Image (spheres, rainbow, N blue to C red):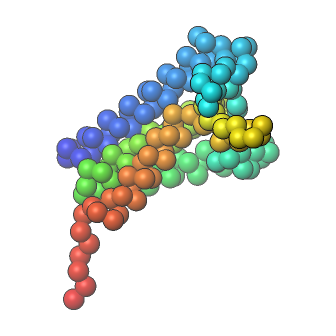
Amino acid sequence: MSPHLRLGLIAATAVLILDQASKLWLLFVFEIGRRGALAVAPFFDLVLTLNTGISYGWFADQGPTGQAIMLAVKAVAVVALAIWMARSHTRTATVGLGLIIGGAIGNAIDRLAYGAVVDFALFHLQIGGKTFNWYVFNLADVAIVVGVAALLYDSFVGYPAAKAP
């Protein structure tokens, strides 16, 4: 196993463990569902949102068949990303792919366990008496975004492409 692949697997495993541990703690130790929203800072709250859709709640009303199709698509995507990660030539891309894989698996576990993704982090800003909310997210979502950013960064400064003749 290459050192890059090892780093990618470590990233995926770390994200998966941290994501699931945070959700389990919030649900069953902190009991966020019973407590309701908790203001942590003037700009950040812990809230419980069960997202049956995908990003931004899109496709939320699909029912069991839609959920099964989403899980199947996610499984195919994780396999494709794992193949890409195994063939990756740069540390940045490999770790980025590991972050995406760990986040995707973490959210898939939620869908299997709860029928929805457990989201809990809410950033907001109040300007002139109006409150502007970012969408509610979790650690898996953060890992996916950071992983995509790493892939974009790597595409600009990473492994040099072969030159055309």
Location of residue 89 (image quadrant): bottom left
Taking the view exactly as shown, the residue that stands out farthest to the bottom is: 165
156 or 85: nearer the viewer: 156
Q: Is residue 25 above or below residue 124?
A: above
Taking the view exactly as shown, the residue that stands out farthest to the top is: 29
Q: Is residue 131 left or right of residue 4?
A: right
Q: Is residue 24 above or below residue 127?
A: above
Write the residue at 50% across / 52% down.
77
Write the residue at 53% across / 47% down.
75
9 or 29: nearer the viewer: 29
**Residue 153, horizontal then vertical, whole percent:** 36, 58
Location of residue 38 (image quadrant): top right
Can residue 134 be spotted in the picture? yes
**Residue 120, horizontal then vertical, whole percent:** 62, 29
Q: Quadrant of the N terminus?
A: top left
Can residue 64 be spotted in the picture? no
Location of residue 99 (image quadrant): top left
Q: Is residue 11 left or right of residue 77?
A: left
154 or 2: nearer the viewer: 154
Q: Quadrant of the C terminus?
A: bottom left
Q: Is residue 112 above or below residue 91?
A: above
The mark total stands at 0
Write the residue at 67% across / 26% down.
47
Write the residue at 60% across / 21% down.
40
**Residue 53, horizontal then vertical, whole percent:** 70, 44
**Residue 150, horizontal then vertical, whole percent:** 38, 52
Taking the view exactly as shown, the residue that stands out farthest to the front is: 128
